[in-house]
């Protein structure tokens, strides 16, 4: 089994209020068969044995599903491989003697918690602002009672694959969350169950996205290229159309805030 000797240039920051800096760590004997996160585990084992603080980083499923492994690696979200999360990135992609620069997501709406871990609760608030869909609780309905066009079902599933990792925000020069928000809006608006509150949902989610401080989309496509689930920017155009349409039918707010 081949191994690598690496130089890791890692961003260290104690908390949100403190300033951070890069620290360099040599790491020897990294198997090429392990994942990038397992390599960081190896580093942390060595740091703890030396009585030093381990590097904080997010992880959960390590199967490319949860979206927690949000790392900026050599200037690219998740390392830059197409349709790959950090936990799916393996050390065989690197060479012996490489210097690897590892940073947290860089966005004002994703403040650093510690080291490589950032607070992505802004995404949660965008989703929460979308509310619920109107469906009857209880046993599952008959599958054929509500037909859905296959083209719509396929598109809805494509958008539903978003794991909320934030790579789209990290890749965008404006730190826009348009790809994430549009995916959450589109996968519901394409299905019958999501159409009841569709207008209210798009208005609320887009306005919450703006209120959270994310930048505007300038349609350059970095988000789609960085997305580990290859979600299309077609969703952003759909979101914009639905937002404009919903705005036309929105009840106007009367001056003074009261009724007649």
Image: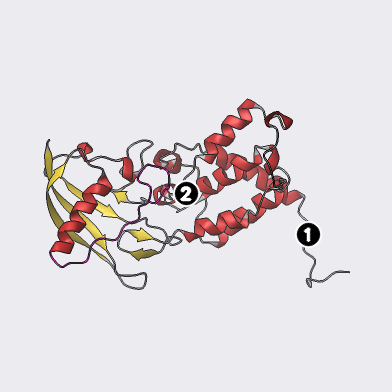
Which of these two is toward me, 224 or 15? 15
Residue appearing at x 48%, y 60% in the figure: 121
- The residue at which mark 1 appears reads as 252
- The residue at which mark 2 appears reads as 164
Q: Secondary structure at mark 1?
A: loop
Mark before the other along the chain sequence, 2 or 1: 2
Q: Position of residue 166 (x, y in %)?
A: 43, 50
Q: Which residues are magenta?
A: 50-68
Q: Secondary structure at mark 2?
A: loop
Farthest residue, direction top: 150
> Is 153 on the left-hand or right-hand side of 48?
right
Q: Position of residue 229 (x, y in %)?
A: 44, 38
| Colour pattern of the rendering | secondary structure
Which of these two is toward me, 113 or 253? 113
Q: How many numbered dots are placed on residues in this image?
A: 2
Tell me the quarter of the image containing the C terminus: bottom right
């Amino acid at each position: 089994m081949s191994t690598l000797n690496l130089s890791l240039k890692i961003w260290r920051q104690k908390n949100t209020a403190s300033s951070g800096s890069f620290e360099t760590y040599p790491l020897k004997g990294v198997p090429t068969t392990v994942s990038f996160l397992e390599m960081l585990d190896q580093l942390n084992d060595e740091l703890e044995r030396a009585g030093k603080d381990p590097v904080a980083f997010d992880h959960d499923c390590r199967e490319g599903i949860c979206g927690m492994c949000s790392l900026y690696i050599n200037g690219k979200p998740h390392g830059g491989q197409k349709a790959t999360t950090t936990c799916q990135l393996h050390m065989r992609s690197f060479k012996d003697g490489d210097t690897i620069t590892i940073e947290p997501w860089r966005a004002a709406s994703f403040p650093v918690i510690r080291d490589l871990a950032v607070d992505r609760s802004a995404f949660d608030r965008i989703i929460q602002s979308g509310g619920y869909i109107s469906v009857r609780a209880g046993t599952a309905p008959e599958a054929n009672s509500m037909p859905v066009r296959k083209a719509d079902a396929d598109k809805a599933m494509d958008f539903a694959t978003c794991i909320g990792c934030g790579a789209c925000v990290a890749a965008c020069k404006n730190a826009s969350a348009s790809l994430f928000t549009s995916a959450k809006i589109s996968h519901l608006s394409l299905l019958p169950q999501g159409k009841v509150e569709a207008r209210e949902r798009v208005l609320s989610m887009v306005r919450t996205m703006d209120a959270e401080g994310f930048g505007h989309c300038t349609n350059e496509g970095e988000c789609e290229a960085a997305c580990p689930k290859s979600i299309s920017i077609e969703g952003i155009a759909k979101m914009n159309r639905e937002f404009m349409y919903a705005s036309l039918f929105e009840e106007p707010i009367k001056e003074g805030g009261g009724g007649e």
